[in-house]
Amino acid sequence: MRHEEPGATHDGASHDVDTRLGARLAQLRAERGWSLGELAERSGVSRSTLSRAERAEISPTAAMLNRLCAVFGRTMSQLLSEVEGESALLVREADQQVWADRTSGFVRRSVSPPHTGLRGELVEGRLAMGADIAYDRPPVPGLEQHVWVLEGALAVTVGDVEHRLAAGDCLRLRVWGATRFRCAGDEDVRYVLAVVLP
């Protein structure tokens, strides 16, 4: 079984998000009556890493959150919206939730107003030069995604097929298995990800 490496620790506002996220992950596990060992078996994330994430001693990586979302049947936006306050119809740019995986060089901005019942959502992704993120499964099988590159170059691998996207290009896909997002240029890449639940 492959275990996910923990993300970096940090302070300030992002630590507050990690604290709320850790508490929500612990709550989801408790609601199912699972021990840390059972969740580790289901997710492929080590028991010690799960424990540290629940206690907000580490910031989860994007790949780790993806595995946990798959086990709990949520998209990443749904999980992150559950640690936010009440839902709003309008969210200003300054108030949009930003989450960073410092280990991989990935920054994720939830553009759509948060709501646990979302079927569609917009996410802005940024990958630093050289960043490469592999997801071994979708958080929800059959998830529809539209990837629209705004700046830079992005390589998206679906199964064994790599798609190279330049600024302005858009890729539509349904996710059933492994995917990989890689900054394919000599500068950071910024893209919009539209996600639609099946």
Image (tube, rainbow, N blue to C red):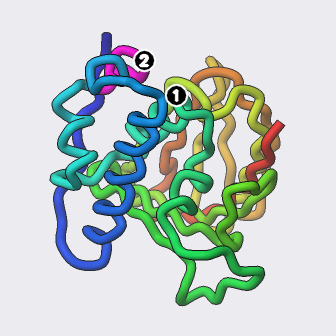
Question: Which is nearer the N-term, disc 2 or disc 1?
Answer: 2
Q: Was residue 43 drawn as part of the magenta stretch in this picture? A: yes
Work out whether 165 lies above or below 138. below
- Measure the alpha-carbon separation of dots 2 and 1: 7 Å
Task: Residue 177: tell me if it is visible.
Answer: yes
Q: Residue 73 at what x, y percent from top left?
A: 61, 34
In the image: residue 141, left or right of residue 50: right
Q: Is most of the magenta stretch helix, strand or loop?
A: helix
Work out whether 91 lies above or below 165. below
What type is the residue that disc 1 sits on?
A: Val
Quadrant of the drawing holding the N terminus: top left
Q: Quadrant of residue 10?
A: bottom left
Work out whether 30 lies above or below 11. above
Front-lying residue, 128 or 117: 117
Q: Residue 4 at what x, y percent from top left?
A: 29, 30
In the image: residue 189, left or right of residue 195: left
| Residues at marks 2 and 1 touching, judged by CB atoms closer than 8 Å | yes
Residue for point 26% across, 35% down: 50
What type is the residue that disc 2 sits on?
A: Arg
Q: Residue 65 at what x, y percent from top left?
A: 43, 42
Front-lying residue, 29 or 18: 29
What residue is disc 1 on? 71
Residue for point 72% across, 63% down: 122
In the image: residue 22, left or right of residue 24: left
As drawn, the residue found furthest toward the top would be 1
Residue for point 39% across, 49% down: 131
Instruction: For label 1, count other residues whose C-alpha is less than 10 Å away and answer few (under 14), some (14-19) or many (20+).
Output: some
Q: Which residues are magenta?
A: 40-45
Q: Which mark is residue 187?
A: none
Label 2: element kind: helix
Q: Residue 140 at what x, y percent from top left?
A: 67, 32
Q: Which mark is residue 42?
A: 2
